[in-house]
Amino acid sequence: DFANWDNSTDPAFLKTSRTLTQAAHEALGGEPGTRPLVVNPFAGGGAIPLEAVRIGADVFASDMNPVAVLLNRVLLEHLPASAQNLPEELRRWGRSVKNRASEELSTFYPRDGDGATP
């Protein structure tokens, strides 16, 4: 049932899975009151770190691919912290990237006779 998408946000299901995770952590020698740690040095798209956070574990995740690192940081750090403001944040960062790219690439793409940028 844990793989069922409908259960991914069910508070009762999440509470049960977190309780079971904590019980397993302590039964296997984890200090009571601490959370299990999941270490994933090849995190890729972030499925394992995301699921670990969902069941109440602390996560250390990385990857050699900088795109994967960025994806994981957004998914695990920035998205939960800014879920309320996400649409506006995306628009703001999009404008920032567009403006910076326009400045840095303008010498390679001069304006047309009518002032348009190709």
Image (tube, rainbow, N blue to C red):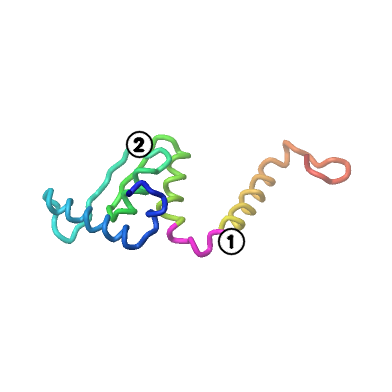
Residue ranking furthest to the right:
113
Q: Is residue 85 left or right of residue 91?
A: left
- Mark 1 or mark 2, which has the lower sequence index? 2
What residue sits 53% from the left and 59% below the top?
86
Q: Secondary structure at mark 2?
A: loop
Report the front residue among 105 and 36.
36
Measure the C-alpha gap from mark 1 to mark 2: 31 Å
- In the picture, the disc for residue 88 is 1
Amino acid type, label 2 = Phe
What span is colored magenta in the figure? 80-88
Q: Secondary structure at mark 1?
A: helix
- In the picture, the disc for residue 42 is 2
Report the front residue among 108 and 74.
74
Near mark 1 (Cα within 10 A), the count class, few <14, some 14-19 or many ≥20, is few
What residue sits 46% from the left and 45% below the top?
71
Query: Residue 28, percent across and down?
Result: 13, 48
Picture quadrant of residue 101: top right
Q: Are marks 1 and 2 in contact (CB under 8 Å)?
A: no
Report the front residue among 44 and 106.
44
Query: Residue 25, percent across and down?
Result: 17, 51
Query: Residue 55, percent across and down?
Result: 30, 53
Residue ranking furthest to the front:
1
Q: Quadrant of the C terminus?
A: top right
Residue ranking furthest to the bottom:
84
Amino acid type, label 1 = Glu
- In the picture, the disc for residue 55 is none
- Residue 20 highlighted magenta (yes or no): no
Report the front residue among 63 and 23.
23
